[in-house]
Image (cartoon, coloured by chain):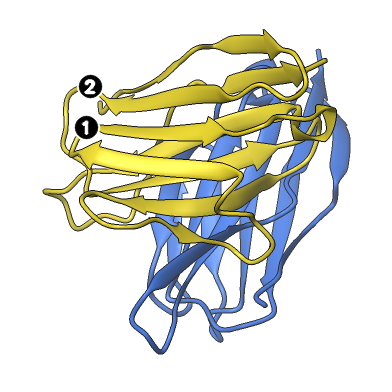
Chain colours: A blue, B yellow
Amino acid sequence: GQQVMQIPQYQHVQEGEDFTTYCNSSTTLSNIQWYKQRPGGHPVFLIQLVKSGEVKKQKRLTFQFGEAKKNSSLHITATQTTDVGTYFCAGVTTMDTGRRALTFGSGTRLQVQP
Amino acid sequence: GAVVSQHPSWVICKSGTSVKIECRSLDFQATTMFWYRQFPKQSLMLMATSNEGSKATYEQGVEKDKFLINHASLTLSTLTVTSAHPEDSSFYICSARDLWTSSNEQFFGPGTRLTVL
């Protein structure tokens, strides 16, 4: 079945440092979504990337979708303590039956030290 | 933004009993709702896709007779864990997609923490 891997599993940074998490899929994706889950909370949708090579920005966050639509990255510039949480990518694949499946990556837990 | 509620927030039950978890989309209609379970510090594992008015689609390895899903209306899906055992203890999260938007965005409920003694 489809697998979505994320690295690193955990990263601890000083406030102000940059942070990047990488997502790789074993199969080509229709699109990829990114979610953030704060400790004790539920996942919150951040963004969806659809086109090959797409780059989208949300303030200090930059999302990229690979040319082959099998990998993606999330980069945070100058982290703040409010960025703490686990970031999940979720890949969407469309099966032969037309059914769509969303598979979550393993997540990257970000800790920011003030 | 779209809101999804779950009830109960947490439940503790004895082994062998059944537990029902409700997932409601409060301000939008959802033909499709998803049920996930999440173990501590791990990712979300999709259990099943719940479609309004039809049978749920279960992921490989998920027992449909153990995890009964009912999606009776466009705003309500229920997950019943039958004959629960300690290994069923987990965080169960539902999500829903808005019927009227083309976005694939899923709105997640706050989750239900199940502890089976």
Which sits in the foreground, A111 or A96? A96
Q: Earlier in the sequence, mark 1 or mark 2?
A: 2
Name the element at disc 2: loop
Kind of residue at disc 1: Thr
Visible residue check, residue A91: yes
Q: Amino acid at mark 2?
A: Leu
Q: In the rendering, which numbered label is found on residue B75?
A: 1
Q: Chain of mark 2?
A: B
Q: How many callouts does the rendering have?
A: 2
The spot of residue B81 in percent (x, y) is 59, 33
Residue drawn at x 70%, y 71% is: A3
Q: Which residue is mark 2?
A: B26
Q: Are marks 1 and 2 on the same chain?
A: yes
- In contact (CB < 8 Å): disc 1 and disc 2: yes
Chain of the residue displaying label 1 = B
The residue at 37%/74% (across/down) is A99
Would you call the spot at circle 1 few (<14 residues within 10 Å), some (14-19), or many (20 or more)? many
Q: Please report the residue visible at 34 percent of the width from the left and 57 percent of the height from the top.
A: B55
Q: Is residue B43 left or right of residue B68?
A: right
